[in-house]
Amino acid sequence: MRLQRISAATAALAALTTLATACEDSPKPGPPAASSSASAPATASPAATGAAPATLAGAQAHVQQYTSCENLGTDPNDSRVPLSGFIGAGDWGITERGVCTDTKARGEIVLFLTPDMKAFQQAAKDHAAKLLAEGRDDTDLASRTVVGKTFALTALKTATAVSLVDPPNSDLRILSCNPDVFVPEGFKKEKALVEGCFLTDYVNSPDGQGSPHRGAVRDPSTEGAAKPGRPSAGSPGLPSAGSIAELKQLVSPHTVDCTKMTVTDEHIQSIDYMPVVDGPPSAWGVNQRAVCGELGGERRAHNLNWLDTVSDMKTLQAKAKAAQLADLKDDGRLKATASKLLVGTNIAVETNNANVRRGLYQLQFLYLNCETGFTAPAGHRLEKAQVEGCVLTNYERPS
């Protein structure tokens, strides 16, 4: 699945990419990845035809259309520029280098005047090719190198890069020279000035803070043939089971520990583990219900997860939505002990264990999220739920 390939690659990002070793905690700015399949002509790219600031002050003013860029400095020893990894004047066709602060993202922006943009992009390509040849397959996968017509920059915060390239009217782009970089549907992919590189408005980031999901929430009932990473029309590709026993077999043993499982209609919870279904299961559209884990006794209850076979998924989602919104009402956060509802076609699992949920996402379960205005980063699933105001997703905001 393409999402898994991206996640695996970005999880092992190298400490140094093309332009810098510095990070947000460890950013990997640098010219992004390449693709020989980019089809748009270079002259069609806003970054190739836009305004052409001739000075660092002009580049600063251009950047300030999209985010803050304060206290511009040109001292090569400016402490805001990381000590290692940053190229300077005389390299890559760069004539001047400066640095400013993005006060919104609380990070720095290193600016480069590059009147010969083709030379800059060729140097970026050569550098990326060298790292890739050395086995650095993660080169540029989370690049924050942004280019205009006669200037480029490295954003030390992911949020800065997103602010610069995300607006529909932005003429700035991420430069990428790694053939394995994937641009999700809904984002631009334009030809760069050198073969083997491309320009995009997609910012990849393994921390989930990159470009937001741009596509509409997928409604499988209106779609046609299957696409990579997406099932065909009529089904979001969720798992199903014919009984609690089948559900147990599906999620055990590596995802949910059901060594001890109790099938019951009784309402079971503990101070540490609170299920989503609250009350008679049948009123929630649940046909059969079981709880896995230690129910307590001499020791406190622990490792509790609930398995449900569902006869009325719409009712389950509607009642779960109401419960979720009630929990979010006070502080906008779910209680740490509250379970999240992950659903299949006719089954569900309730768990407050993040590791369990990660395993369930691999099995194609999706989380019912009813937060107002919620969206998922590009590359994650975002499906239509059976109740208005909710989506099904495999993305969770960092807590």
Image (cartoon, helix red, strand yellow):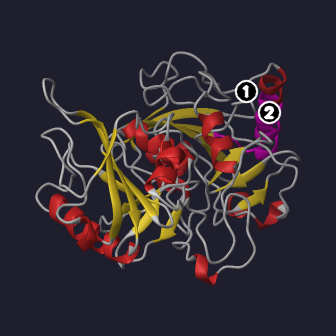
Which residue: 21% across, 42% down?
A: 273
- Give the left or right position of residue 306, taking residue 96 as reference: left
Start-end of magenta stretch = 113-128
What residue is shown at x 27% (from left), y 49% (from top)? 339
Name the residue carrying label 2: 123
In the image, what residue type sits under mark 2?
Ala
Q: Estimate how packed mark 2 is, as few (under 14), some (14 to 19) or many (20 or more) residues with alpha carbons within 10 Å.
A: some
Query: Of residues 22 and 251, which is closer to you in this image?
Result: 251
Q: Is residue 364 above or below residue 257?
A: below
Quadrant for residue 32, please give it.
top right
Which residue is at 45% across, 61% downward? Answer: 347
The mark found on residue 91 in the picture is 1
Q: For the residue marked with disc 1, what is the amino acid? A: Asp
Q: Which mark is residue 237?
A: none
Is residue 114 highlighted in magenta?
yes
Is the stretch drawn in magenta largely helix, strand or loop? Answer: helix
Q: Determine if residue 71 is in view.
A: no
* Of residues 210 and 150, the one drawn nearer to the viewer in this rendering: 210
As rendered, which of 115 and 18 lies closer to the eye?
A: 18
User: Image point 73% across, 69% down: which residue?
Assistant: 226
The percent position of residue 89, horizontal first and vertical second, equals 66, 27
Image position, residue 324 (x, y; %): 23, 62
Residue 244 belongs to magenta span: no
> Which of the marked residues, 1 or 2, is nearer the chain's N terminus?
1
Taking 122 as reference, is 216 left or right?
left
Residue 218 position, x and y percent, is: 56, 72
